[in-house]
Image (cartoon, rainbow, N blue to C red):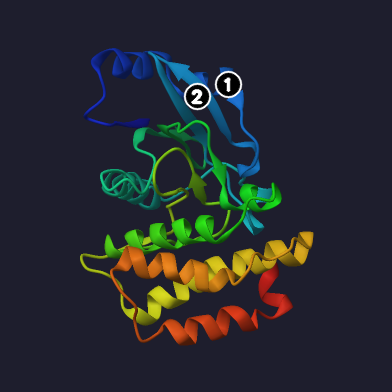
Amino acid sequence: MEDLRLDPTLPIALCDALAGRGLPALWQGAQALPGGRGSARLLRLEGRDLVLKRERRGGRLSGFMPDRYLAKGPFLKEWALGLHLAERGLAPRPVALLLHGCPLGFRAFAMTEAHLPSRSLADLWREGELDAEVLGRAGEAVAGLHRAGVLHGDLNAGNLLFTRAPLPLLIDLRHSSWTEGPPAPSTRRHNLLRLCRSLHKLQHRHGQAWPEEPWRALLAGYSKGWGGEESWHPAFLSAAERGFPIRSLFW
């Protein structure tokens, strides 16, 4: 059994190509992209650059169920959330989602628009280009995410994608939460600290030099995107500057 979702705004020719050739076959013939457990590939179809991802698990279950799932809900939520954020210029636009039945569950393939060239926030740091301007844009994007009612479930430096767009795009949304209005200040602060923890983790692993006052730059961008400063900002700065216990940097 297959459940195929297509973006309703796609041209008919592209819909026919996706439905006719099938996402698993397209994935086999596409060009591998770095990162993402080797599950993301790039292809060009009907004049469009697209990223096709074969969903794979991380963590403890990856050893015996690397690409099989039992619950469709998180994938359907990510599909709807991607469309919601793409309209606001905060995520790549979803193109197709296939939930492909197999023994002991189903496999999932997700396709989005490709934004080329693109580099993650982690890539920019490794390449020596992390500065106040980059961190400000990252903070502004996270504020836009929060204003849209979304808390990213895995907000890390690899999931902020810098392209030619004014703001970086958020990817890997499956474990995110989505509410009608903006989340509470305390939850937004913790979500932004999750990104800080990711940067501390990179610094601990690779010994990269911090740019000048990184957390103030990140918070300045967040304030710009949110529309002003808030009472929780001093507590955020204190926590980000203090850092995180070593044990929290390895999960």
Q: Residue at x 45, y 31 (%)?
A: 114
Can residue 50 be seen from the camera position used here? yes
Q: Amino acid at mark 2?
A: Pro
Tell me if label 1 and label 2 are in contact, CB under 8 Å: yes
Q: Nearer the viewer, residue 60 or 198?
A: 198
Element carrying mark 1: helix
* Residue 59: % across, % down: 64, 57
Q: Nearer the viewer, residue 117 or 212?
A: 212
Residue drawn at 34 percent across, 81 percent down: 230
Dot 1, crowdedness within 10 Å: few (<14), some or many (≥20)?
Answer: few
User: Residue 52's x, y, as percent?
Assistant: 49, 30
Residue at image location 61% in from the left, 64% down from the top: 198
State the residue in front, 204 or 34.
204
- Left/right placement of residue 103 relative to residue 17 reads right
Amino acid type, label 1: Gln
Residue 24: numbered disc: 2
Q: Where is 58 relative to 195, above or below? A: above
Q: Could you tell me which quadrant the C terminus lies in? A: bottom right
Where in the figure is residue 109, as x and y percent of width and height? 46, 34
Does the rendering let one see residue 251?
Answer: no
Location of residue 156 by image quarter = bottom right
For the N terminus, the quadrant is: top left
Side (left or right) of 244 relative to 181? right
- Judging by the rendered image, the residue that carries numbered circle 1 is 28
